[in-house]
């Protein structure tokens, strides 16, 4: 198994995992932005990072001291929602290219050190027609996204979007696009 980060300075979130005889995985991790990428505006509230820990401690203190059942139930529901929000965070998304079998799109969700949920979509190689980079408009912004064009039935064509939750930048998508075409056409 060989790990590489082809764009380490600009886009360190891209990780390529190559397994001999099996295929390649193009993983895009959901990393928090570094200080140089955030700018001054997002760094205005440094206490936000410890907010979740303070909220849990505060809820624990209130839980034992509150006698009102309505407030206790509300606090419990708030705590459950906070845990659910943290446990369903997207950790990484990946495109796994298996040259003789097909393409698998994966989304891993969970806590930062513990993936809890995985959703997978496998597209057989016989159905794959092409891999494309499309562009879409979102308000005043142009977003690029990687899609797999495939035909599950004779007269039907579908698009499956890779990295639909993270939406990596264009240089990452071109690196993945070129790698997928290299893997699929080298068989």
Image: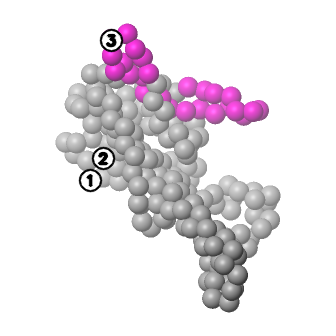
Q: Which mark is residue 18?
A: 2
Looking at the picture, does residue 73 appear above or below residue 41? below
Q: Residues within 10 Å of mark 2 (few under 14, many from 20)?
A: some
Magenta span of residues: 134-158
Q: Residues within 10 Å of mark 3 (few under 14, many from 20)?
A: few
Q: Position of residue 28 (x, y in %)?
A: 48, 48
Q: Position of residue 88 (x, y in %)?
A: 51, 57
Instruction: Give the residue pinned by disc 3.
Output: 154
* Residue at figure coordinates x 42%, y 17% from the top left: 157
Label 1 – label 3 distance at C-alpha? 38 Å
Label 1 – label 2 distance at C-alpha? 6 Å
* Residue at figure coordinates x 24%, y 32% from the top left: 101
Front residue of 70/46: it is 70
Is residue 73 visible in the rendered structure shown here?
A: yes
In the rendered structure, which disc, 2 or 3, sits on the residue that comes first in sequence? 2
Q: Residues within 10 Å of mark 1 (few under 14, many from 20)?
A: few
Q: Position of residue 18 (x, y in %)?
A: 30, 47
Q: Which mark is residue 1?
A: 1
Circle 3 SS class: loop
In the rendered structure, which disc, 1 or 3, sits on the residue that comes first in sequence? 1
Q: Is residue 163 magenta?
A: no
Q: Is residue 139 magenta?
A: yes
Q: Which of labels 2 and 3 is toward the front?
A: 3
Label 2 – label 3 distance at C-alpha? 33 Å
Q: Which mark is residue 30?
A: none
Q: Are marks 1 and 2 in contact (CB under 8 Å)?
A: yes
Circle 1 SS class: loop
Compared across the picture, whether 88 is left or right of 24 comes to: right
Is residue 58 visible in the rendered structure shown here?
A: no
Looking at the picture, does residue 54 appear above or below residue 8? below
Q: Position of residue 163 (x, y in %)?
A: 50, 41
* Main secondary structure of the magenta stretch: strand
């Amino acid at each position: 198994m060989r790990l590489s980060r082809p764009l380490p300075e600009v886009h360190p979130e891209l990780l390529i995992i190559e397994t001999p005889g099996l295929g390649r995985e193009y993983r895009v991790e959901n990393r928090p932005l570094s200080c140089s990428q955030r700018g001054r505006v997002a760094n205005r509230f440094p206490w936000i990072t410890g907010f979740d820990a303070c909220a849990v401690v505060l809820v624990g203190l209130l839980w034992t001291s509150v006698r009102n059942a309505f407030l206790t139930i509300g606090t419990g529901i708030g705590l459950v929602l906070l845990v659910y929000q943290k446990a369903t965070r997207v950790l990484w998304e990946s495109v796994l290219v298996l040259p003789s079998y097909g393409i698998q799109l994966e989304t891993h969700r969970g806590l930062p050190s513990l993936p809890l949920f995985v959703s997978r979509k496998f597209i057989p190689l016989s159905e794959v027609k092409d891999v494309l980079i499309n562009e879409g408009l979102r308000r005043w912004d142009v977003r690029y996204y990687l899609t797999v064009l495939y035909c599950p039935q004779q007269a039907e064509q579908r698009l499956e979007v890779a990295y639909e939750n993270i939406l990596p930048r264009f240089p990452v998508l071109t690196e993945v696009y070129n790698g997928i075409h290299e893997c699929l056409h080298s068989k």
